[in-house]
Structure formats: C-alpha cells, structure tokens
Image (cartoon, coloured by chain):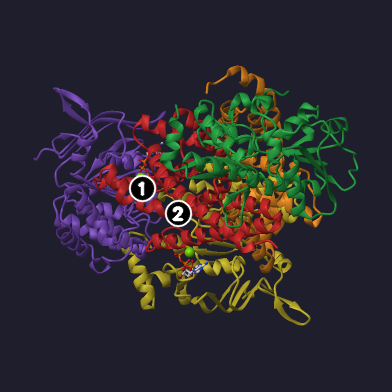
Chain colours: A yellow, B green, C red, D orange, E purple
C-alpha cells in the first residue's frame, strides 16, 4: 500500500474557548476519494480549511505529500511555516467552496487563467488553451467570455471547479459544493465531479449533505461529530449498517427529511 | 416721531454693534464690553432713558447690512464717517477721531509712509480689516486688489505681519498702538500718522429712517461734550475730545 | 500679566453656547430628518417632491450661505431671529437634510421581507412602520446620527461668523485681548474634541441599548 | 431692500474670480485628501499596534474638531514653529487633512467589504499577498468607494468658504468683500448660494451616474 | 361539491418584458391541500405572492371566499381594489415564507401576538393565551420569551407558522418553508405541517421541492412550467405516472439529485 498523501496527526483547533477539533488524526491515501459527513458544526469545513491553510491550527502536525504543512525544517528542528513555505505547499492543494467565490470582476476565462499566469508564470496563450480544455470538460466552453453574474449557480460552481483544476493540484477539497444550488442544478455539478473522479487519480476530499452522492462517489466515508471521527468505513457499511448510535440517528434524520441514501 | 426711542426705553436696552478692536471697543476678561465707543453710547443712552446697551461683536463689513436688517439699533464701533457711508446710514455728530497708522517691520525696510507708497511698490502687501476705512484708502490709492489682504481681526493682522505674510498692517493710530504695545515685539514699529490720509471721526450710526432717534442722541451727546464728561470718558483711552468737538458731521460727510 | 483664569472663563461661556447650539440644533435636525426622511418614502407624490426639494436644497447650498441668508436676508422678509435662533435654524435644517437621507436609507434597508411579513399579517402601513420597520431601522441610523451630531458640533464654529458668542468666537475675542494665538485655539481644540468624544461615547451606549436582543441578526 | 439686477451683473466678474479659487482649492484639497486618506488607512490597518493606535487617535481628533479652528491653527500658529504657508496652501492642506480622515474610512470600508471568500479563493489559488491586492481585492474594493469619495468631494466643495477666515479670496470672501464696499448683502450672498446650488445639482446628477456605474461590480 | 374558495381566472403577470404567468386559471376547494411543484422560475412563488397581494396582477380576476381580490364592486361595476378592500381580504389569508421573516426585535411571543392585537384589537391577555396554545402546538412553548436570533432555523420557521395561524386565516400559503433549513431541521417543520394538515380544515397551498413530503401531504399536485400548469392530478398519479414529458424530466433530475419521491 502506498504511503499516505495526507497524514493528520493529533491536531486541535480552538476558537477562543470553543474546541472545534479535538486531537484529530487521520490519513488519506494517494488517489483516494473520501467523503466527510456529519451534523452541522461538527468540524467538517474546518478540517478542509485547515488543509487549505485558511486557518491556523492550535496543536498537532499535518504532513502533505511528504512535507510538513504548518511547519518547516529549520536548523535541524521544526519551525512554524513561513509564507514562502506555505506558498509552496499550496501548489499541491486546490479547493472548491460552497459559495463558489468566483472573482466577480473577471470573466469566466480570466477566472481560470489568473492563477496559472500569476503563480506559475504560464504564458497567456498556454493558460487560455488549458482553460478552454477545462471549461470544455465542465461543459461551459461557450460561456468563456461571460461574467460570473451572468451564470446560474450550477454554472458558477462548474467554473470554480475548472479554476481549481487549472493549477493541477494533487489534492482537491470540495466543501458542500452543491448545497447553495437550486435542486435541479445540483445534478450538473455532481456529473462533473463524477467524471473527475473517474478520469483522474487526484486525491479528493468531499464534505457533503448529499448522502446518495457520497455513497456513489467515495472509497471511504468518515462520520464526524463534535470535532471527532466517530465512525469510518466503506460507504455500504456506513450507510446501511452504521455501528454507532450517533451515526444511526444522524442518518435517520436525514432520510426522514427526504434525502435518498 | 420718536417711536424708536420709546421702543428702546420700553425694552430697557439698545442693541449696539461693536468691533473687536481696542481701544475703540474692547471686551474685558469678565466678558464686559467697554472701549471708548460703547462707553459713550452707554452714557448717552442712559441720559435718554435707555438703561443699558447690549453689544454684539461683528465684522466691519457686516455692520451696515446688520443695521439695515434690524439686527442692531446702532453701530458704535469706530466706523469712520465717509460720504458713501453717510449715504447708507444716519450718523450722529462726531465722537472718536483718529488718524491712520501703519504697523510694519522694524526699520521700515520698504520705506512705506503712505498708501501711495504701497501702490507704487509692486512687492508691498497691505493688510486691513474687510470693509474698513483702511481697505478703501488703499484701494483708492491704487493698490491692486490682490495686494490688499483682507484680515479678519487686528490680532491676525499683527500675526501676519510678524510672520512676513504682509508688509504693512493698517489701522487707526490708537488701535495700532494698542495692538503693538500688547504684542511687545521689538521687531514691529509704527508709522503714524500715514502721510496724506486725513483724520477721520466716527459717530454712532443709525439706520436710515431712525433720524428722530439720532437727533435725540445728538442732543444728549452735545450736552455730554459741553459738560466735560465726554473728555473724561474717552481721554483715558487716548482719544482727543477736542478733535471731535472741532468738526461736524456735515463737514465729514461732505469731505472727499 | 494676562488674567488667564478670566479668559478661560470666557471660553467656557462660549463652550456653553456651543453646547446649547449643538443640543437644540440636534433636536431640530432629528425632527427634520424623520419628517423629511419618511416624506421621501411616502406614497404621495407631492409629499415626496416636497421632501426631496428640502433635502436637495439644504444639502446643495453651503451651510455658510444658509447662515448668512437666515441672518441677513430673512429679516427683509420680516423674520428677525436672534443669532442663537438663526444658528439653530440653519444648523438644524442643514444637518436635518443629511439625516433625512439616513432615515430613508435605514427604512429602506429593513428589507422587502419584513415589509411583506407585515402585509401577510395584515398590518396597515402605519402599524408596520411604527411597530416593525422603525424599531429595526433605528439601530441602523444611530451610528450615522452620531456622526451627524459631531458634524453639527463642528458646524457651530461657523456661527461665530454671525457674531454668536460660541467657543470659536470667544477664542477670537481672547486672542484679540491677550495677543496670544496658541493658547485659546489649543484650548478650544481640546474642548471640541472632548465634546465630540462625549457624543460618540453616548451614541455607542445608546446603540448597545437599542440593539440589545438583536444580537446575531446583523453581522 | 430691492433686488438689483444691475448690481448683480456688476459683481459677477468678481464672484467668478472667487469661484475659480474655490474650485482650485477643492481640486487640490481632494488630491491631498486622497493621498492622506490612503496613508491613514494603511497605517490603521497594517502598521504595528502602537502606530495604528496613535493614527486612530489622530484621525479621531481631526474628525472631532472643526475645520475652521484647524485652519486658524495651521495659518496662525504653525508660523511660530517656522512653518509659514501661503494662505491657499494652508487652506488646501487643512481641507486635505480634514477630509483625508473621511477618505480613510471609505478606503477601509471598501476593502473590508470585499467578501472574505474572495481572500480565501485567492489563497486557494495560491496568489501571493501582492497579487491578491492587485488582481482580486482592489479591483473590487475601489469601484464601490467612488460614490462615497465623490460625496465627500462635494461636501468639501461646500466647506471652502471657511478659507475666507484665513484670507483666501474664494467665492465667499469675494462676496463678503463686495458686500463690504457696497453695504449690500442680498445680491452677493444669494448669488453665492445659487452658485453652490448649481454646482451641487450638477454633482448630484453626476453622483447618481457614478452610483449606477460603480455601486455594484457583480451586476456588470 | 362545495364551491371553490379560490378561483383564479385567466391571470397574467408580467415583469417588464418578461411574462411570468400567462393566462393561468385554477380553482381550489375549501379544505383542500394543494402542492405546487415545478422547476425554478416557473412562477410558483409568484402565484402565492399574488394571492397574498404582495404583487399586482397584469390581467385577469381572482375570487377568494366569494369576493374579488384585486377588484371591488363600485357603482355597479368592478373597480381596482383600494387599500381598505385589500385589508379586508387579507384577513382570510396567511403566508409562511422561505426565510421566516420573523420580526427580529420582538420576542417569540410578541411575534405571534403583534398582529392579532393590532389588526383585530384582541386584548393582550387573550392574544397571549392563544399564542401560547399555538406555540405549544408547534412545540415551542418554552421559547416564548426567546428572541428569534436565539433560535435555530427550524424553530424560527415553526414560530413563523404559529404567527400566521394566530390570525386564523381560512387559507394558508407555504413557500418552500424548509428549503432554507439545514437537512436535520427539516423534519421538525414538516411534522408541524403534517399535524396542521390532519387537525384543521384550513385550505393550504404549498410550494416545495421536497417531493416526498408533497406526495404525503397533498390532495392534489400541480406541476408548473414557464408560468403554466402543465399537469395536475393526485400525488400518486403525478409522481409515479407523469403523463407529460416535462414533468417526467423534471422528476428524473430531482431524483438523480438524491431526493426521495
Ligand atoms: N471563525 C470562527 N470563529 C468561531 N467559531 C467558528 C468559526 N468558524 C467555525 N466555527 C465553529 O466551529 C464549529 C465547526 O464548524 P464547521 O464549519 O467546521 O462545521 P461543519 O461541520 O462544516 O458544519 P456545516 O455542516 O454547518 O457546514 C462550529 O461550532 C462553528 O460555529
Ligand atoms: N421582482 C421581479 N422582477 C423581475 N422578475 C421577477 C421578479 N420576481 C420574480 N421574477 C421572475 O419571475 C419568474 C418566476 O419567479 P418565481 O419566483 O415565481 O419562480 P419559482 O417557481 O418560485 O422559482 P423557485 O423554485 O426558484 O423559487 C422568474 O423568472 C423570476 O426571475
Ligand atoms: Mg461546513
Ligand atoms: Mg420560489
């Protein structure tokens, strides 16, 4: 078995008096598709944001692709990472947000080409060529010159996926990428993600309330509650034979609310 | 008719406009209004049966419009009589007389002795109160508008002189003396009187149409002058009673 | 030597006039702000037009001009006001025009959703305004009202130009009598700042009181 | 007193002369305010705590005290420590610094109004801090600032009469000077009012246009 | 069969050039529970808003409980309704909104008592008694003194339902009352509505994307598309044997997105 691409070791995250993650440890294998589920406030978003270095951690270590994420070697011991180190680490990771966070002042094409041109010095022509391929992949080649405000939610989210892919990260993080969408627009985004999962060997971490999709998409499901992993396993096991009482009650509520598992 | 006087008697005070320019008008540390012009006015009004005066400090330029707008009943501020002003307001007989003076840098480096000198020197800037006699004299002598700096008050004028923003600050002799003695600055000297500038006298200025009140005022003023009380009031401030008594409104208003 | 204690007393007298002007001006400004601000969102065209004219006129012409008009020109129309009345009138109407836009903005900011809830609950427009919209709009107005009050306080310095014996004016008097420029101006700068500080502290306190219970609604 | 049209035409050239100075002072003051405001905003948002604190205090102090008194200070007190500015320059600096404190607020609000998600998206796409400012934050922050800044520009324009207190011959001072020598207040003051009203009605239209054009970036 | 309580006759609604409702006609019987479904933008919300008189109509007539809604008899013919007429008509109708629209400055109890006290002059004591009964019915009697900000989304929505019921309307309108809620909170709101449907004979119109709930709740389902009723029928028929192609494709998408029908 390959060495894990992400190794989270006993990390803690506090906001003032509130402990959101409490000595959490987990590993992710290269190419693995992981779904993180659990009730609201359980820390799912927080773990993705920590991996994207959008937060700081209060304790513990994280290794990504062989290097420490929040630390770097210095004079033989580990020092807190500086901006340069973080910059290098972020190259390996991409993230898609619940609310898309497209750059509203740039057209679709520029949204996708901006980062490759600025962070990797890709010439405009090459960046645009690659961007058009990605937009084609998400089915939006014809919207390249549109402004984000002219797109539907589902289209925006597909652009956001293309934008993250343009940097060719090894790891992709998806945080409830469909929950801000109208129900009929959900499917077009999920389709893109299915294609992505099938065609690439990228490592993917997915936070979602769409249990059906989590079931089909993931190699492994982690159930979070109150900043801890309560249960993990293959989708079939978690969704059909959850062992923990908390997992069972969560799934019961979700199903009662009309979501298919 | 003396309707206006009856009105003032009834309300018990007259509203006077004053400047903030010692020794013509002054405000003591306790806020009490004094100075030669208000003191005379207070005494005359008392004799007319108006118990007191209530003063409000005003810019020179705002005094006549304020009078016309009914904001004050009379101006007692060292507003010198000049023909145009006589046309705009009704003056009493003369009260305070003074010549014009310059305050300038020690040694008078530009050699300025008259308004004409200032007009002739393209570098000389003069400061004067806006709407005051000095501003007019300078303009009439041919000093261009942009070299006549309108200064809001005496202290500002002196400060601008000390700071080198203007070369001359012009006011009546007694005002300049008061200002310069307070400043106690060895680098400032006084040229007095200014060559070619006449001696001016002020009077209490009433609104056109209030001539009855003005005439009543004149009667009491004449009595005051005669009794010698007039000199007792104004001479401590440095003004000459003889100068005021040797001329008349008629002459001053006709002068060119 | 100069009798400073007396002159400081003079400045404090001026401070009293400044306070008086600020207070009475603010009362007038608040009244005008609500009258004109609600007028702007009225159903009736004529009311809206009237309110708009008032607002644009007083925001459009400078406070100085307004002051000089009220003081020197109004008397020709037979209205003679004391300097204090003129000052309060000009400042109150001027700041009230700015406040009116604040009232309008705050009332508009209480969104469509709250208005629609009122319609669905069959409240009349008046009831909705009084019980639902204004109580929520008020906290939104307060910070800007605080700023406006400070603008008004600063505006009172201008009334020295119509010979109202406010703080700035008294500083000028003291300056003329003593020959010192630095001391009177430094003193009044500090006094103005303290008054502004008092206003902003007071407004913050008021804001906290009014928003109590609304925590977490607005971010 | 009667309104006298002949007199109006007589004083018109003088008033227009003053209007020129008024506009000049406004334009220069605005330029100073734009720069001073930026300095204040940057100091408050990014400087070390003590400096940021001190800046905040200075900004609060300037905002809490009347421009008129500040002008007196700049013009009459600063020369005591050897800084003697020409009247117009002193006025421009007074206006600029005073309104700079307002501009600083607008800058800060504009920048803080850029949603957090935008900073995060920039980070997630690995842009550097500089790149984030230039390509993501400022292009979104600046357009909404424009109407607010223009608003203050108009406010500043209307406060230029204060400069008459420090002998700048702007519109109001010219009018006063005319009034002084003619003893007529009605025409000059009314004309000044009309000038201001015309200028601000024009600027209201201009502002509406700016608001429409810049209020919201997303809607383009 | 009873006379319809709502009779919508050929109404049109335009926003500028956009025609949102295009000659729509429908009837609702007293006590009927109706579900309105259809894709985003099809006009479902618009029809509820028109019934609540939150919009104006561009053409057509609506009769509610025997009276014209947007018109009133005047000198023998029909004139546009004035504010007084609308005020009288609104007494018959209540509405619950997607985003609750509670009054944030009033406590839960005051939210419920405000309208009865103001519009019907109910004395405070009586209004509070009735409010407590309603809060008890929605399971929130213990939150009467809380501020809305202290409630979860599901609790807010239950308060909103109680608030609308406090006016005892004959007709209740529900516009996607669960779609702004976290999935685990949906059920508590649906339970309240089930109870309401079972216990009262109020007429209810429900716009929803929760097909499962629509199925259980409704006597009749209307499928909207582009401002027209494309298909209507019993829930079983619509959901299991939709006749129209558009209904079929809509339901397919919803199911694919993970919603139970
Ligand atoms: N910036 C913050 N400051 C304080 N607390 C925060 C902050 N961000 C998140 N939290 C808290 O951290 C906890 C975990 O939040 P997180 O967003 O990770 O939950 P989640 O599992 O993603 O929930 P959801 O399903 O609602 O998105 C919550 O209790 C939340 O209130
Ligand atoms: N105020 C408005 N101005 C212009 N167009 C509007 C307005 N309100 C609604 N619309 C348009 O009317 C159409 C119908 O809207 P409506 O809200 O009724 O749809 P809906 O069926 O409720 O959709 P959803 O499921 O998304 O809530 C849409 O195309 C919408 O864009
Ligand atoms: Mg989350
Ligand atoms: Mg809708």
* Location of residue C54 in the rendering, given as x and y in whole percent from the top left corner: 45, 34
- Some atom of ligand 1 lies within 8 Å of the CB belonging to the residue at label 2: no
- Some atom of ligand 2 lies within 8 Å of the CB belonging to the residue at label 1: no
Compared to residue B178, the image places residue C195 above or below, namely below
* Location of residue C47 in the rendering, given as x and y in whole percent from the top left corner: 37, 33
Please tell me whether mark 1 sits on a helix, a strand or a loop. helix
Chain on which label 1 sits: C
Left or right, A188 with reference to D25: left
Q: Which comes sooner in the sequence, label 1 or label 2?
A: 1
Please tell me whether mark 2 sits on a helix, a strand or a loop. helix
Label 1: how many residues lie within 10 Å, few (<14), some (14-19) or many (20+)? some
Residue name at image x 76 percent, y 47 percent:
B177
Compared to residue B15, the image places residue D78 above or below, namely below
- Ligand 2 position by quadrant: top left
Residue pointed to by mark 1? C113
Query: C160 or B120, which lies in front?
Result: B120
Residue D153 visible to an observer of this rendering: no
Residue D11 visible to an observer of this rendering: yes
Q: Residue furthest front?
A: B227
Q: Residue furthest top?
A: D6
Q: CA distance from mark 1 to mark 2?
A: 22 Å
Left or right, D1 with reference to E162: right
Query: A35 or E68, which lies in front?
Result: E68
Label 2: how many residues lie within 10 Å, few (<14), some (14-19) or many (20+)? some
Query: D39 or A54, which lies in front?
Result: D39
Tell me where residue A12 sits by quadrant.
bottom right
Residue pointed to by mark 2? C142
Quarter of the picture holding the N terminus of chain E: top left
């Amino acid at each position: 078995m390959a060495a894990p691409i992400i190794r989270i070791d006993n990390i803690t995250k506090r906001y003032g008096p509130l402990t959101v993650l409490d000595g959490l440890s987990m590993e992710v294998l290269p190419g693995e598709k992981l779904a993180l589920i659990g009730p609201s406030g359980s820390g799912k978003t927080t773990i993705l944001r920590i991996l994207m270095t959008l937060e700081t951690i209060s304790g513990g270590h994280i290794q990504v692709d062989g290097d420490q994420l929040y630390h770097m070697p210095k004079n033989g011991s580990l020092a807190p990472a500086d901006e340069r180190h973080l910059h290098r680490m972020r190259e390996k990771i991409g993230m898609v947000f619940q609310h898309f966070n497209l750059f509203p002042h740039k057209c679709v094409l520029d949204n996708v080409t901006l980062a490759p041109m600025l962070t990797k010095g890709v010439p405009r022509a090459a960046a645009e060529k690659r961007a058009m391929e990605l937009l084609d992949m998400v089915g939006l080649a014809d919207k390249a010159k549109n402004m984000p405000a002219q797109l539907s939610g589902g289209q925006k989210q597909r652009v956001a996926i293309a934008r993250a892919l343009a940097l060719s990260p090894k790891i992709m993080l998806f945080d409830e990428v469909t929950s801000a969408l109208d129900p009929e627009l959900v499917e077009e985004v999920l389709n893109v993600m299915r294609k992505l999962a099938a065609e690439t060997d990228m490592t993917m971490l997915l936070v979602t309330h769409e249990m059906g999709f989590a079931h089909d998409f993931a190699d492994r499901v982690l159930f979070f509650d109150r900043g801890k992993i309560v249960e993990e396993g293959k989708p079939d096991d978690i969704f059909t034979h959850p062992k923990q009482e908390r997992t069972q009650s969560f799934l019961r509520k979700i199903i009662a609310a009309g979501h298919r598992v | 008719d003396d309707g206006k006087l009856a009105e003032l008697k009834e309300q018990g005070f007259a509203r006077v406009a004053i400047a903030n320019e010692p020794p013509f008008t002054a405000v003591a540390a306790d806020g009490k209004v004094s100075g030669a012009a208000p003191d005379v006015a207070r005494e005359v009004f008392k004799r007319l049966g108006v118990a007191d005066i209530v003063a409000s400090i005003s810019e020179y330029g705002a005094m006549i419009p304020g009078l016309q707008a009914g904001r004050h009943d009379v101006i007692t501020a060292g507003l010198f009589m000049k023909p145009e002003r006589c046309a705009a307001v009704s003056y009493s007989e003369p009260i305070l007389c003074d010549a014009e003076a310059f305050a300038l840098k020690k040694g008078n480096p530009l050699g300025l002795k008259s308004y004409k000198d200032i007009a002739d020197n393209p570098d000389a800037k003069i400061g004067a109160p806006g709407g005051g006699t000095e501003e007019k004299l300078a303009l009439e002598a041919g000093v261009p508008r942009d070299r006549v700096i309108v200064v809001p008050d005496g202290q500002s004028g002196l400060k601008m002189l000390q700071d080198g923003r203007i070369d001359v600050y012009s006011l009546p002799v007694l005002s300049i003396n008061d200002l310069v003695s307070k400043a106690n600055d060895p680098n400032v000297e006084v040229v007095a009187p200014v060559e070619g500038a006449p001696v001016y006298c002020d009077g209490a200025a009433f609104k056109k149409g209030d001539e009855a009140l003005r005439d009543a005022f004149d009667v009491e003023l004449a009595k005051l002058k005669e009794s010698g009380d007039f000199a007792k009031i104004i001479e401590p401030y440095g003004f000459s009673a003889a100068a005021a008594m040797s001329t008349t409104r008629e002459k001053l208003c006709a002068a060119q | 030597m100069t009798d400073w204690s007396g002159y400081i007393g003079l400045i404090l007298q001026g401070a009293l006039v400044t306070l008086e002007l600020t207070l009475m001006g603010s009362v007038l400004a608040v009244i005008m702000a609500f009258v004109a601000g609600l007028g702007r969102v009225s159903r009736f065209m004529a009311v809206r037009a009237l309110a708009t004219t008032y607002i644009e006129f007083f925001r459009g012409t400078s406070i100085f001009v307004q002051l000089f008009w009220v003081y020197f020109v109004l008397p020709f129309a037979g209205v003679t006001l004391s300097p204090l009345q003129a000052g309060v009138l000009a400042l109150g109407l001027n700041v009230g025009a700015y406040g009116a836009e604040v009232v309008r903005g705050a009332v508009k900011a209480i969104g469509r959703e709250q208005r629609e809830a009122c319609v669905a609950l069959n409240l009349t427009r008046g009831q909705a305004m009084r019980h639902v919209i204004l109580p929520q709009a008020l906290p939104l107005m307060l910070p800007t009202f605080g700023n406006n009050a400070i603008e008004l306080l600063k505006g009172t310095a201008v009334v020295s130009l119509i010979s109202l014996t406010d703080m700035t004016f008294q500083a000028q008097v003291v300056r003329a009598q003593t020959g010192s420029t630095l001391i009177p101006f430094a003193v009044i700068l500090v006094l103005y700042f303290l008054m502004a500080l008092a206003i902003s502290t007071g407004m913050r306190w008021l804001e906290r009181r009014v928003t109590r219970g609304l925590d977490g609604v607005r971010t | 007193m009667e309104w006298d049209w002949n007199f109006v035409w007589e004083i018109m050239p003088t008033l227009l002369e003053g209007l020129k100075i008024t506009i000049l002072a406004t334009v220069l003051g605005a330029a100073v305010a734009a720069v001073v405001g930026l300095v204040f905003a940057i100091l408050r948002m990014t400087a070390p705590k003590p400096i940021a604190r001190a800046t905040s205090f200075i900004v609060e102090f300037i905002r809490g005290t009347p421009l008129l008194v500040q002008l007196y200070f700049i013009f009459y007190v600063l020369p005591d420590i050897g800084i003697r500015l020409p009247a117009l320059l002193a006025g421009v600096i007074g206006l600029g610094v005073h309104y700079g404190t307002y501009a600083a607020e607008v800058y800060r609000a504009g920048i803080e109004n850029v949603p957090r998600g935008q900073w995060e998206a920039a980070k997630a796409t690995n842009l550097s801090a500089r790149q984030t400012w230039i390509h993501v934050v400022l292009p979104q922050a600046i357009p909404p600032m424009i109407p607010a800044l223009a608003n203050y520009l108009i406010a500043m324009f209307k406060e230029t009469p204060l400069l008459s207190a420090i002998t700048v011959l702007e519109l109001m001072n010219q009018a006063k000077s005319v009034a002084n020598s003619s003893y007529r207040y009605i025409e000059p003051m009314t004309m000044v009012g009309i000038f201001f009203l015309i200028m601000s009605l024009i600027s209201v239209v201009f502002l509406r246009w700016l608001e429409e054009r810049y209020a919201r970036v997303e809607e383009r």
